[in-house]
């Protein structure tokens, strides 16, 4: 009887941790995770859950009911989605900057297959998305997320997490920081493109015979790619700073 109770308790703990992990993997910016086959993603979530075996909660089976288990699972999914959204906003800042630059530079006219969504996206957007995913792994943020998960299983037992107003404010602040980071990343290239537009407008006033439409595309594309190559050395520094802010916010949500 004791062995049966222990088995049911472990199974319930496994399901609760798996719900928390699966909720996070919806938004975590791992390269190719969204386009991978469903069985592979399921195995990844289960493997991640098994690595946290020593921190699985021991669920009291005698007090467990179907309604309580359902409520706990919803709490775990909510916590996982909260962590996943906070992590996903980190990569969205770079994607938003690439979208602003690509639209002004003319890269939006050329599309490529996005490996994450299998949809048509601009070439610059796909490149920046892959860079952001590689930076996530290169800077060790994946290991920090594992540590936060292990800690959250102690500070946030099953069924105790609630999406309160302070937690929502944390996510809103991260979203605001995403927009400010994207604007800071895109501002040098946007300023250069505005100067290029002004220069081409002056040339058009001086010589009305110039074919500015055919001249503007290559000039703006070369100017944008040159500026991006110049400021790309700052990407790891900006990503690390934003990642530190994201980790502090998540630690505040799950409890230190």
Image (cartoon, rainbow, N blue to C red):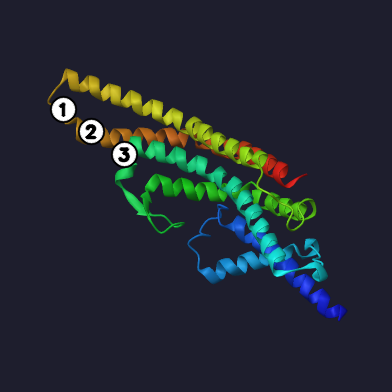
Which-is-in-front pick, marks 2 and 3? 3
Q: Which residue is mark 1?
A: 210
Q: Residue at x 29, y 45 (%)?
A: 109
Looking at the rendered image, the quarter that the N terminus falls into is bottom right
The image position of residue 8, as x and y in percent, is 77, 74
Q: Which residue is mark 2?
A: 215
Mark 2 and mark 1: span between their CA atoms? 8 Å
Q: Residue at x 50, y 65 (%)?
A: 36
Q: Which residue is mark 3?
A: 106
**Residue 40 versus residue 17: which sits nearer the camera?**
17
Image position of 114 (left or right of 154): left
The image position of residue 197, as x and y in percent, is 29, 26
| Local secondary structure at mark 1 | loop
Mark 2 and mark 3: span between their CA atoms? 12 Å
Sequence order check: which comes first, mark 3 or mark 1? 3
Q: Is residue 142 visible?
A: yes
Q: Is residue 49 visible?
A: no
Tell which residue pokes out farthest to the bottom in this image: 1
Crowd class of label 1 (few under 14; some 14 to 19; many from 20; radius 10 Å): few
| Local secondary structure at mark 2 | helix
Q: Residue at x 79, y 71 (%)?
A: 9
């Amino acid at each position: 009887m004791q062995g049966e109770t222990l088995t049911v308790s472990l199974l319930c703990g496994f399901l609760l941790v798996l719900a928390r992990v699966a909720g996070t993997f919806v938004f975590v910016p791992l390269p190719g995770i969204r386009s991978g086959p469903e069985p592979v993603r399921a195995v990844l979530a289960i493997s991640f859950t098994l690595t946290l075996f020593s921190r699985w909660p021991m669920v009291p089976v005698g007090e467990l009911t179907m309604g309580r288990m359902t409520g706990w699972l919803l709490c775990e999914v909510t916590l996982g989605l909260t962590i996943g959204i906070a992590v996903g906003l980190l990569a969205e800042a770079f994607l938003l900057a690439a979208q602003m630059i690509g639209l002004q530079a003319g890269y939006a006219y050329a599309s490529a297959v996005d490996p994450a969504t299998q949809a048509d996206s601009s070439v610059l957007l796909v490149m920046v998305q892959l860079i952001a995913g590689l930076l996530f792994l290169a800077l060790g943020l994946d290991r920090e997320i594992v540590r936060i998960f292990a800690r959250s299983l102690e500070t946030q037992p099953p069924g105790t997490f609630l999406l309160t107003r302070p937690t929502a404010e944390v996510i809103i602040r991260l979203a605001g920081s995403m927009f400010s980071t994207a604007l800071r990343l895109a501002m040098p290239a946007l300023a250069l493109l505005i100067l290029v537009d002004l220069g081409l407008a002056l040339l058009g006033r001086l010589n009305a015979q110039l074919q500015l439409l055919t001249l503007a595309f290559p000039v703006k594309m070369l100017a944008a790619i040159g500026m991006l190559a110049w400021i790309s050395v700052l990407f790891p520094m900006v990503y690390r700073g934003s990642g530190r802010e994201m980790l502090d916010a998540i630690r505040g949500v799950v409890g230190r």
